[in-house]
Image (spheres, rainbow, N blue to C red):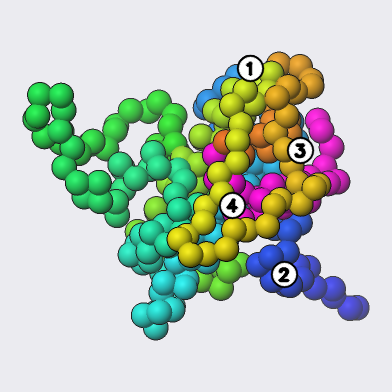
């Protein structure tokens, strides 16, 4: 009797986008995060889109950290590689609510003073059971580790913790913006920011078929759909390559996904 292997085929490369690729962050996890933020229902395609966008963002951060580690002839990623990646690419500065919580980022913003000139002490870790991006960051550990493996990377526990936190904070912010899009009936404040370094040529315009956030939306005001997630993505990410790639991959990931 012949036994067939159940092992999934290897991905052709980090640029491949499919529903399988977004699997590190399951739609069920996405819906859990959204429930912490809003009572609105998240459609199946909306959950897949949010999972895809989060995966794209984390993949880009890991790729930048890998380049930083390679320059020092290291294979295992450390928090310093994360800082280097963020420093080199402003598009990667996302999920910043995590920064105040993580030791990796302490001291980067200097001493903070209040209105009376008194030093504001660092925020202490909360013991509250109230759901938040910080408290719920551990939920992303399995997905982050799976994503690291898919990118051929390993990381020290502190680096995994930071990636967990950034993913959780980013998805929480994405949920809030998507809920706002639904409440307001569309994106009321929308624009494109193009990041260009001095001396570099201006990037080409976005393709004609790229997503544009519409001033108004269709559908009820109780459900967050795929287009609401895409609109929220344009709010969360700058108008550079990362945003365009996140939108494109999210659309591809939801191509064959039902709206329910």
Tag in front: 1 or 2: 1
Tag in front: 1 or 3: 1
Q: Determine the CA span between mark 1 and mark 3.
A: 19 Å
Q: Quadrant of the N terminus?
A: bottom right
Q: Which residue lies under the disc numbered 1? A: 183
Q: Is residue 98 magenta?
A: no
Residue 47 position in % (x across, y down): 69, 38
Q: Secondary structure at mark 4?
A: loop
Tag in front: 2 or 4: 4
Q: Secondary structure at mark 2?
A: loop
Instruction: Pick whichever of labels 1 and 2 is earlier in the sequence.
Output: 2
Q: Exactly how many numbered labels are in the figure?
A: 4
Asked whether 188 or 163 is in front, the reply is 188
- What are the residue bounds of the magenta stretch? 236-260
Q: Determine the CA span between mark 3 and mark 2.
A: 22 Å
Residue 73 position in % (x across, y down): 39, 83
Instruction: Pick whichever of labels 1 and 3 is earlier in the sequence.
Output: 3
Q: Which residue lies under the disc numbered 3? A: 45
Extreme residue toward the right, this view: 1
Residue 249 position in % (x across, y down): 72, 52
């Amino acid at each position: 009797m012949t036994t067939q292997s159940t092992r999934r085929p290897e991905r052709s490369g980090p640029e491949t986008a499919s529903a399988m690729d977004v699997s590190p962050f399951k739609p069920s996890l996405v819906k859990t995060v959204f429930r912490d933020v809003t009572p609105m229902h998240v459609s199946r395609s909306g959950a897949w889109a949010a999972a895809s966008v989060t995966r794209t963002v984390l993949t880009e951060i890991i790729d930048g950290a890998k380049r930083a580690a390679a320059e020092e002839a290291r294979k295992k990623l450390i928090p310093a590689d994360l800082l280097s990646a963020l420093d080199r690419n402003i598009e990667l500065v996302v999920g910043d609510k995590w920064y105040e919580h993580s030791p990796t980022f302490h001291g980067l913003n200097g001493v903070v003073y209040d209105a009376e000139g008194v030093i504001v002490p660092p925020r202490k870790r909360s013991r509250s059971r109230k759901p938040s991006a910080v408290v719920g960051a551990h939920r992303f550990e399995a997905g982050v580790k799976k994503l690291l493996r898919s990118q051929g990377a390993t990381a020290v526990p502190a680096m995994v913790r930071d990636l967990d936190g950034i993913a959780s904070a980013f998805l929480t912010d994405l949920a809030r913006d998507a809920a706002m899009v639904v409440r307001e009936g569309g994106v009321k404040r929308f624009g494109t920011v193009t990041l260009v370094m001095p001396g570099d040529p201006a990037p080409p315009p976005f393709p004609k078929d790229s997503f544009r956030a519409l001033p108004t939306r269709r559908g009820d005001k109780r459900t967050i759909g795929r287009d609401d997630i895409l609109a929220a993505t344009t709010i969360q990410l700058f108008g550079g390559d990362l945003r365009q790639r996140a939108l494109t991959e999210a659309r591809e990931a939801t191509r064959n996904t039902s709206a329910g």
